[in-house]
Amino acid sequence: MATTEAQGQSPSRGRASLEQRLLEKIRRHERVSKNINQLADEQLTLGQRLADGLADGVGSWSFIITFLVMIVLWVGANGFLLVTRGWDPYPFILLNLVLSFLAGLQAPVIMMSQNRQEAKDRIRAEHDYEVNLKAEVEIEQLQEKLDLLREKQWQELVAMQQRQIALLEQQIKLLEDWRRP
């Protein structure tokens, strides 16, 4: 789902067409709610799934702890082996290269994942608006039906009261006629 601005429509015009589609769905008794996560996941490419998986893995405590342990082992092994000529002597230039390479690859992948999440959040917000709008329209329709029922009941009560008044007037007239000699 694209936003109305992206489609070249003004927001109010986009809302009006959304309301028209919504009224049509209500008329046909269709559901508006849907699982946005499932719809978004079905449209992901393999690269996008990999980027999301990488972003999920890199953003976990297990990755951070494992990575810290690996750095400590690297520095410890090279510090111990420095006596016998380690493979990456102090100031650990190879380690800096690996860390820079890792950071250079992680940043764009995480940004891609965040952009997708932002797009999913935007779709979710539009969907929430649509569901709320449908609920509002249906509540208004229910209120109109209740008002019509209430009006009908008032009319029936007034008619019933008028019949009762007419019957009472007949009774009063009969009583008056009966009391007169």
Image: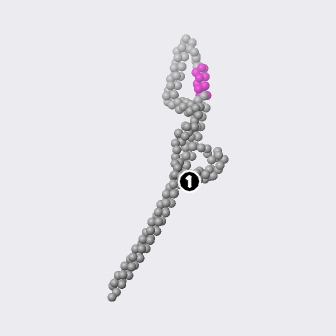
Q: Is residue 65 left or right of residue 173?
A: right
Q: Which of the two residues, 109 or 85, is positioned nearer the viewer here? A: 109
The percent coordinates of residue 148 (x first, y second) are: 49, 63
Label 1: which secondary element:
helix
For the record, the magenta segment spans 93-104
Q: Which of the two residues, 76 or 100, is positioned nearer the viewer here? A: 100
The percent coordinates of residue 157 (x first, y second) are: 43, 69
Q: In which quadrant of the rendered image does the C terminus lie?
A: bottom left
Q: Which of the two residues, 50 or 88, is positioned nearer the viewer here? A: 50
The percent coordinates of residue 105 (x first, y second) are: 60, 28
Snapshot quadrant of residue 116: top right
Q: Which of the two residues, 2 or 110, is positioned nearer the viewer here? A: 2
For the question of whether residue 110 can be seen, the reply is no
Query: In the displayed structure, would residue 173 be above or below residue 110?
Result: below
Q: Residue furthest top?
A: 84
Q: Is residue 154 left or right of residue 106?
A: left
For the question of whether residue 95 can be seen, the reply is yes
Say which residue label 1 marks: 23
Query: In the displayed structure, would residue 51 be above or below residue 6?
Result: above
Label 1 environment density (alpha carbons within 10 Å; few <14, some 14–19, many ≥20): some
The residue located at (58%, 24%) in the rendering is 99
Residue type at mark 1? Leu
The percent coordinates of residue 151 (x first, y second) are: 48, 65
Q: Is residue 8 left or right of residue 22?
A: right
